[in-house]
Amino acid sequence: MDPVVIPILVAALVVVFLVASTVRIVPQARRYNVERFGRYRRTLQPGLNLVVPVADRINTKLDVREQVYSSDPRPVITEDNLVVNIDTVLYYQITDPRAAAYEVADYLQAIDQLTVTTLRNVIGSMDLEETLTSREEINSRLRAVLDDATGKWGIRVNRVEIKAIDPPATIKEAMEKQMRAERDKRAAILHAEGERQAKILTAEGTKQKDILEAQGTQQAMILRADGEAKAVELVFQAVHRNNADPKILAYKYLETLPHLASSDNNTFWVIPGELTEAVRTVTRAFGDQPAARPEEAAGAGAGPSSDEGGTPELDAGWTVSSAAAAAADEAGKQAAAAVSDAKAEAEAARSPQTPRRGQTSGG
């Protein structure tokens, strides 16, 4: 090889090395801290940058995008002396690359330790119930403390979230029992409220039913009474219009007697006191002449008697034909048969029970 070529190649390699050491390309969202002879010189921005070869050296390369840091669960003691494990998630962003590289040795470890100490201070002033229900308050207090402390490190804490709060197993079991008891209590209350509403509705329905039935019975009784009143009025008008005498009324009275004991519920029978008077009236009705008044009968009894046997003489008004006597006998038999039928029906109705003596009323 020609001795001249070797120096040229060496010179070319040196030039290439120098050019490569001088040019620095920084990606987007990255920051490079440059030191000159071991001292911070400047921070390279994204794009093409030139540095002094050999004199300048890139010390740290930082990412200025927002990053997420999840810490391990740490035990924390609450105000009521219960140990809970709390896991936090931290969102932070580097705002000053120089401070992040030179103000703190390891900003992630520093943030983690600061988070734990702040969390213990915050949780130590709360009981378990408040800890489980005050996540927003805990997050805001953590963020305020961390943002104030990490500001001089060139780091901004954007958000702090509590990912999990794990109480001890015994506390979990007690909480589950409490929640189960609360659910059972609410179920019992709802069940009792439902039964109460059902009973109220049932009572209101029964009340409305009774009211409607009473109103229906009232209307039926009123209509029945009106009908009976109109029927009695029509009978009364018919009797007065036809001028019915006591003979017809007595005969209708005898016809009605068999119906007095026709009901199945009769347990005794009564012979009215007016029965003999009704029979006597019917007997006189079938005679040739009308019956004499009591005063006339008394006067006739005091009159002259026949010469034979002392039998009193009857005038024409007291003459009774054989047809009248037969009619009277027939009426008496019908009345006796009606009474017998009524008595038999009453005895038949009382047959399953101990027979009782019939009650009669004299005329």
Image: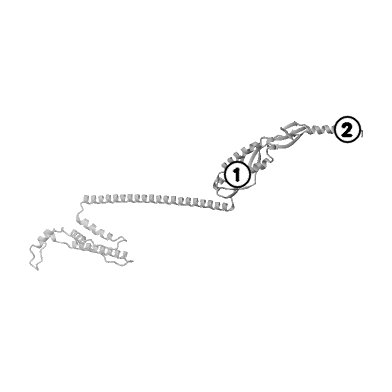
Task: Give residue 40's position: percent from left, percent from top.
Answer: 72, 34
The residue lying furthest to the right in this view is 2
- Between 15 and 114, the one lying in front of the other is 114
Task: Give residue 155's position: percent from left, percent from top.
Answer: 65, 37
| 307 displayed left or right of 111 | left
Residue 337 quadrant: bottom left
- Between 269 and 51, the one lying in front of the other is 51
Per the image, the residue denoted by label 2 is 7
- Could you tell me which residue is drawn at 60 percent across and 39 percent down? 145
- Could you tell me which residue is drawn at 67 percent across and 41 percent down? 108
Quarter placement of the C terminus: bottom left
Q: How far is the residue under mark 1 from the one under mark 2?
A: 67 Å
Marked residue nearer the N-terminal end (1 or 2): 2
The amino acid type found where label 1 is placed reads: Leu
Per the image, the residue denoted by label 1 is 119
The image shows residue 137, relative to residue 341, as above or below, that is above
The amino acid type found where label 2 is placed reads: Pro
Quarter placement of the N terminus: top right
10 Å crowding of disc 1: few (<14), some (14-19), many (20+): many
Task: Give residue 86's position: percent from left, percent from top.
Answer: 61, 47
The image shows residue 145, relative to residue 257, as above or below, that is above
